């Protein structure tokens, strides 16, 4: 019996580090860098989506964004996809990625600009 060449990807939220990791065989193969909007209305703000070299084209980035939206839904907060990949994914999956209110997007952009050295 042969094993599948692709091991299942696990997603791990490392909230304190601001990372949602895609992990395969104990190694991070991708991540979303994000922050939590620090004042009401709270939101999860995606800043970058990264897939490590050699792991592209396997749906890892899409899985990360889908999982990120799932986390936000569970927490009852919107997602602000400031990352171009996350924004593109959201536009293609409106049923899974509702738009954040305009004021939340503006607050997320302001918080990012105030702490841009971190990103």
Image (cartoon, grey):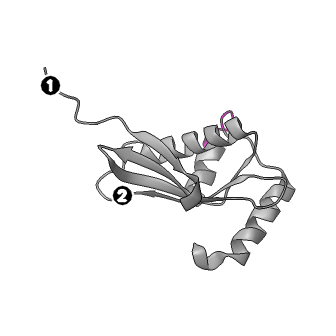
Mark 1 crowdedness (10 Å alpha carbons): few <14, some 14-19, many ≥20: few
Q: Which residues are magenta?
A: 92-96
Q: Percent x, y for residue 103?
A: 86, 58
- Alpha carbon distance from label 2 to label 1: 26 Å
Q: Percent x, y for residue 11?
A: 47, 42
Q: Nearer the viewer, residue 22 or 93?
A: 22
Q: Is residue 16 left or right of residue 8?
A: right
Residue at horizontal 59 percent and vertical 74 percent from the top: 118
Q: Secondary structure at mark 2?
A: loop
Picture disc at residue 70: none
- The quadrant where residue 34 appears: bottom right
Residue at horizontal 42 percent and vertical 53 percent from the top: 30
Labels 2 & 1 near each other (Cβ < 8 A): no
Q: Is residue 64 left or right of residue 6?
A: right
Q: Nearer the viewer, residue 58 or 69?
A: 69
Placement of the N terminus among the 4 image quadrants: top left
Label 2 sits on residue: 52
Residue at horizontal 74 percent and vertical 67 percent from the top: 109
Q: Is residue 110 left or right of residue 117?
A: right
Does 39 lie within the magenta span? Answer: no
Q: Nearer the viewer, residue 26 or 119?
A: 26
Residue at horizontal 35 percent and vertical 34 percent from the top: 8
Q: Is residue 61 left or right of residue 52?
A: right
Label 1 sits on residue: 2
Q: Residue furthest bottom?
A: 117
Q: Percent x, y for residue 68?
A: 59, 45
Q: Nearer the viewer, residue 10 or 16?
A: 16
């Amino acid at each position: 019996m042969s094993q599948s060449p692709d091991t299942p990807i696990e997603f791990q939220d490392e909230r304190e580090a601001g990372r949602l990791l895609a992990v395969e065989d104990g190694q991070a193969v991708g991540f979303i860098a994000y922050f939590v909007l620090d004042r009401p209305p709270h939101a999860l703000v995606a800043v970058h989506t990264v897939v490590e070299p050699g792991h592209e084209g396997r749906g890892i980035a899409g899985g990360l964004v889908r999982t990120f939206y799932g986390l936000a839904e569970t927490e009852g907060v919107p997602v602000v996809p400031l990352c171009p990949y996350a924004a593109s994914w959201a536009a293609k999956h409106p049923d899974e990625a509702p738009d954040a209110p305009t004021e939340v997007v503006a607050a997320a952009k302001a918080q990012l600009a105030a702490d841009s050295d971190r990103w």
